[in-house]
Amino acid sequence: MCTDLSGSIASPDVKLNLGGGGGEFIKESSATTFLRQRGYGWLLEVEDDDPEDNKPLLEELDIDLKDIYYKIRCVLMPMPSLGFNRQVVRDNPDFWGPLAVVLFFSMISLYGQFKVVSWIITIWIFGSLTIFLLARVLGGEVAYGQVLGVIGYSLLPLIVIAPVLLVVGSFEVVSTLIKLFGVFWAAYSAASLLVGEEFKTKKPLLIYPIFLLYIYFLSLYTGV
């Protein structure tokens, strides 16, 4: 006795709900159903877009232009009577603002000698490291990032006097006075932020190397 077993097996008609209550459905293919039945449905899952991946570029790089602008004003106007919270330059250090100031100083100092821009950046990094180590030896509670930011931002007074020196360069006495004013301005801005009360009678030991560092920066104005 022979039994005819020929025939066909229809694939199940499975529908997926794509909306919470909208009633939208899509027919699922046999391959998709097979993967789900075998426990491989996770291969078909699609992750939702993470809002964190759609942040603006400046926010992604941790660049706050308003914060940088406020710190620039704090450095250029260091007098306490103006009402600026100058401690934010030290207590909330950033990297991009000081780097931009150092790069700008490099450009106006070297008259197109871009190959030595790295030299000025090196002086900024290792000069700040020297000030940091000296401050810690003297008992100061300051981080390297704070010193790096303060020293970088405090180059702004030297940038401000640069165009003035171009005008009065032929008058040696006036030029020298403006240079001294710029160095004192920069050194005061940096020292008033880095040299706290914890140094007591040791303040001159930290103010002096800061002053020398800005004298060296100023000497680079005519080239390296």
Image (cartoon, helix red, strand yellow):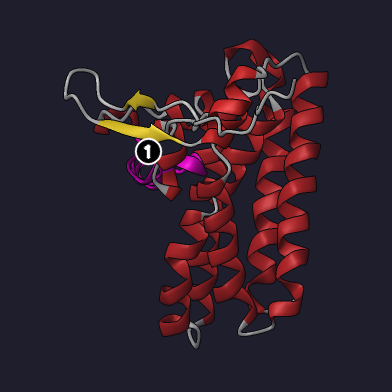
Where is residue 60 shown, x and y percent of the image?
49, 41
**Image side of residue 181 versus residue 31, left or right:** left
**Quarter location, residue 120:** bottom right
Q: Is 163 above or below relative to 180? A: below
Where is residue 160 shown, x and y percent of the image?
42, 63
Name the residue furthest front.
Answer: 1
Where is residue 113 shown, x and y percent of the image?
69, 83
From the viewer's side, name the closer residue of 198 and 149.
149
Name the residue furthest bottom.
Answer: 170
Looking at the rendered image, the quarter that the C terminus falls into is bottom right
Where is residue 207 shown, x and y percent of the image?
66, 35
Q: Give the range drawn in magenta.
A: 59-79
From the viewer's side, name the closer residue of 42 and 53.
42
Does 9 appear in magenta?
no
**Image side of residue 60 versus residue 141, left or right:** left
Residue 28 in sight in this render: yes
**Image side of residue 67 versus residue 53, left or right:** left
Report the amino acid beneath label 1.
Answer: Asp
Q: What element carries label 1?
A: helix
Instruction: Name which residue lies at 75% across and 31% down.
Output: 132
Instruction: Name which residue lies at 59% across and 53% down.
Output: 99
Q: Is 91 above or below relative to 113? A: above
Does 72 appear in magenta?
yes
Q: Mark 1 points at which residue?
A: 67
Residue 181 in sight in this render: no
Q: Is 114 above or below relative to 146? A: below
